[in-house]
Image (cartoon, rainbow, N blue to C red):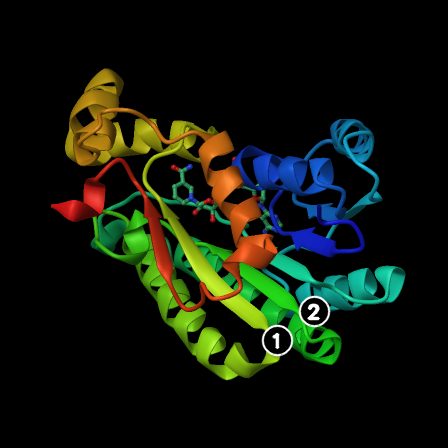
Amino acid sequence: MLNNRTALVTGSTSGIGLGIAEQLAANDANVVINGFGDADEIAAIVARLDALGSGRVAYGAADMRDADAVRALVEQVAADHGGIDILVNNAGIQHVAPIEEFPVEKWNDIIAINLSSAFHASAAAVPHMKRAGFGRIVMMASAHALVASPFKAAYVAAKHGIAGLTKTLALELAEHHVTCNAICPGYVYTPLVERQIPDTAKARGISEEEVKRDVLLAAQPTREFVTIEQVAALALYLCRPEAAQITGTTLSMDGGWTAR
Ligand code: NAD
C-alpha cells in the first residue's frame, strides 16, 4: 500500500517507534530506523523488518541531540531513496523530578530530543516533500501535549511545543499535499514508562505498585494501557491517502484521560 514511499522513523529501535516502523515496513514502504542500542540487536531488527514487505529497511545512527546529525540523516535518507515521503518524529526521553531538583542537562536533552529534533528533521524533509508534492509528518506527542502532570517540567513543555509546531507546519504546508499531525497517546507500556516508575515513586513518596495503579492508570478512565499496536495503526492511517484532509490536529489515544 505504501510501496514507493520512503519513511524515516526517529527513535525506532524500541517501543512505539519500532511498532510504527514495523507497520510501515509491512505495508511495503522503504523504512529507515534510528535510535540507540546494541549493534547486533539493531542489525537483527533491520533484517526482521526488511523481510516484512517489499521495501528496503536500513538504519541511520544520528543522535537526536545533535542538530547537524539530524539534518544530515534526513539528507542521507533522501539521497539514498530519491526523496523522503514520511517523517515520524518519534524519538523521546523522560525524566521525572521536582522543578527545583530538575537537572539542567536533563532539561536540555529532553528539549533537544523531544522538541528540537522534530524541528530540524522537519525543516530538512520539507523541501523534498514540497518537490514531490506529497508528504506526511507524524509527530509522536503525548497526552502531555494537552495537559500537564507534576514533576515532568521538560517533557510537558516539549510536548506542548510539539503541538504548536504541528499546527504551524500544517498551515505552512497545507497547499503542498503535506500533512502534519500529532498523535497524543496516554500511557503505553514501553521501556520509557517502565523506567520512570522508580523515580515517580521517589518523587511522590509511594511504592512502585502504587505508581502503576494510582498515578499511571488512574489518569486513564479505561484503566488500561494503550498498546504499541494501536498507536502504530493510527500512524499508518495518517500516512494513507484517506488521511489527506487530516492536518494540524492533535489526535488523542488516551483511554479518555484528556476528556476530564
Ligand atoms: P522507548 O524508550 O521505548 O523508545 C525511545 C526510542 O528513542 C529508542 O529507540 C531510543 O533509542 C531512542 N532515543 C532516545 N534518545 C535518543 C537520541 N538522543 N537519539 C536518537 N534516538 C534516541 O520510548 P517510547 O515509549 O516508545 O517513546 C517513543 C515516543 O512516544 C516518545 O516521543 C514518547 O515521548 C512518546 N510517548 C510515549 C508514551 C508512553 O507511555 N510510552 C506516551 C505518550 C507519548
**Is 179 or 139 nearer to us in this picture?**
179
- 76 sits left or right of 220 in the view: right
Mark before the other along the chain sequence, 2 or 1 = 2
Q: Residue at position x 32%, y 63% from top?
A: 160
Residue under label 1, please give it: 123
The residue at the far front in this view is: 242
Expressed as whole percent of the image width and height from the top left, the position of residue 170 reads 47, 74
The reply to whether residue 256 is visible in this rendering is: yes
Q: Residue at position x 25%, y 31% from top?
A: 216
Is mark 2 in CB contact (under 8 Å) with mark 1? yes
The residue at the far top in this view is: 209
**Is 229 or 62 nearer to us in this picture?**
229
Where, by quadrant of the figure, is residue 204 drawn? top left
* Amino acid marked by disc 2: Arg
Query: Counting other residues with Cα less than 10 Å from the Cα at mark 2, is it few (<14), some (14-19), or many (20 or more)?
Result: many
Residue under label 2, please give it: 71
Query: Counting other residues with Cα less than 10 Å from the Cα at mark 1, is it few (<14), some (14-19), or many (20 or more)?
Result: some
Expressed as whole percent of the image width and height from the top left, the position of residue 207 reads 21, 19
At numbered mark 2, what does the secondary structure look like: helix, strand or loop?
helix
Q: Residue at position x 26%, y 23% from top?
A: 212
**Is 99 or 169 nearer to us in this picture?**
169
Query: What is the number of the mark on residue 143?
Result: none
- 85 sits left or right of 51 in the view: left
